[in-house]
Image: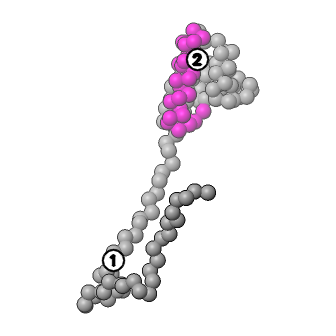
Amino acid sequence: MSNSPVVRPLQASASTPVPPVPPGQDEGEGGGSTVAERAAQKTEPPRLYQVLLLNDDFTPMEFVVMVLQEFFRHDLDTATQIMLKIHHEGRGVCGVFTKDVAATKVELVLAAARRAGHPLQCIMEAA
């Protein structure tokens, strides 16, 4: 138990004087106080960005599948399908994220590719 004093909010009592209303103004006419109403602001959902891998002639397909599984949490079948799309069409969408998450994923993939010695390119575009 602490020895700190108990603080209680002040309560108006019958003996507390109430300031008088100026003559000619009624309490209901808004002369005594102003109440501002808040306008409801509509917030827009964050913009989404798609993370894409670009095809090159040097990065092994197995590495691309591993990247899709490790960084984008795709299962083996989905990762293989995306890898084949990248191989045939030149690029493929790995996932769609908010801007910060997409930028982080791009940096992680590029760093992993550089560590492994592959020229794999990863970019983000507005979805």
Residue 36, position as x, y percentages in the image: 37, 70
Q: Is residue 100 above or below residue 17?
A: above
The residue indicated by pointer 1 is 33
| Nearer to me, 34 or 52 | 34
Magenta stretch mostly in which secondary structure? helix
**Mark 2 or mark 1, whichever is nearer to me:** 1
Residue drawn at (40%, 70%) of the image: 37
Is residue 83 visible to us here? no
Q: Can residue 85 be found in the magenta stretch?
A: no
Question: How is the model colour-coded?
Answer: one colour
Q: Amino acid at mark 1?
A: Ser
Q: Is residue 69 left or right of 55 when viewed as pictured?
A: right
Q: Secondary structure at mark 2?
A: helix
The residue indicated by pointer 2 is 112
Q: Amino acid at mark 2?
A: Ala
Q: Is residue 38 above or below residue 113?
A: below
Which residue range is magenta in the image? 95-121
